[in-house]
Image (cartoon, rainbow, N blue to C red):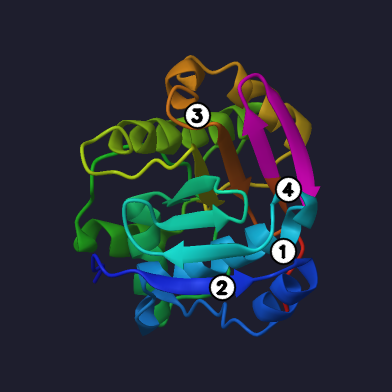
Amino acid sequence: MRTSQTSIFVEADNADVLRALLANIDTDVPPRSEGRTTEQTERYAIAHLLATLPASRFTFPLTVVHGDRPDFLIEEGNGRRIAIEHVEAVPENEAKKAFLREVGDSEDMHFIAHAEPGERRRSTKKLLKEIDVDDASDGWVGDSVEREWANAVAHFAAEKARSVKKDGYDRGDETWLLMYDNWPLPHVKPEAAASYFVAHTAVADIFGSFSRVFVMDGQGVWEFTAGLWKYHALKRPN
């Protein structure tokens, strides 16, 4: 359960100290069936982001505070404060199915199913039936993978864009969004996916709230600003 308490995640006088501290942070995220917490997923994401971005992005010394509203606050030596909001992009029904597979006797290997952002929650009974049937669906053709990825990212980013505007949210001098991409898709081509996201109709509202949007998966990190993007190979902190 989330609390309103804050804690120091890292304090570093320079880039070398930051790298050393990140290497000693526990970034393990257990399976959903073993009590995975929001704090664990947030710690994983911020540690990997800080390891991936060039240290020259930041002014040292810096302190990273883990809390709520925002999830993280970077306080730099020059006085700049960067608020970072975290979200996992995952279909609720697929997350529940992953949990059910872990606690049951289902095969680890299964077909990827299509999902819709914001789809209605399905009952456990129905999800268990879907696991048993393991329907291969119609698959994806052409650039449908990248279009679906862009729609999912835009959906979660737009939801967070609204939440950070609510009273009581500390937006610092800049507000970033850090999204962990757990959307079920075959291989996503970074360039095509990014081009569809920056052209999405929700982008204006998203960048009305966030100066930067980072989307992380197990291979890399997309970094978006309004109309621009770059792709970083993921660097692991340890």
Measure how far apart labels 2 and 1 are at the Cα level. 12 Å
Is residue 62 highlighted in magenta? no
Dot 1 or dot 4, earlier in sequence: 1
Residue occupying image coordinates x 78% and y 47% = 232
In this view of the protein, can residue 192 be seen by the observer?
A: yes
Magenta residues span 222-233
Residues packed near mark 3 inside 10 Å, few (<14), some (14 to 19) or many (20 plus): some
What amino acid is at disc 4?
Arg
Image disc number at residue 151: 3
Specify few, some or many for label 4: CA neighbours under 10 Å numbering under 14, 14-19, or 20 or more: few
Tag 3: amino acid:
Asn
- Report if the CB atoms under discs 4 and 3 are less than 8 Å apart: no
Locate the N terminus by quadrant.
bottom left
Q: Would you name the residue on which mark 4 appears?
A: 57
Dominant secondary-structure state across the stretch colored magenta: strand
Q: Position of residue 157 (x, y in %)?
A: 44, 35
Cβ–Cβ under 8 Å for marks 1 and 4: no
Task: Give the Cα distance between marks 3 and 1.
Answer: 27 Å
Q: Where does the image place residue 186, in percent across and percent down from the top left? A: 65, 47
User: In the image, is 191 to the left or to the right of 75?
Assistant: right
Between 87 and 62, the one lying in front of the other is 62
| Badge 2 amino acid | Val
Q: SS for tag 4? A: helix
The location of residue 79, given as percent across then percent down, is: 55, 48
Say if mark 4 contacts mark 2, CB within 8 Å. no
Q: Earlier in the sequence, mark 2 or mark 1?
A: 2
- The residue under label 2 is 10
Q: Nearer the viewer, mark 1 or mark 4?
A: 4
Question: Which tag is nearer the camera, tag 4 or tag 3?
Answer: 4
Secondary structure under badge 2? strand
Name the secondary structure under disc 1: helix
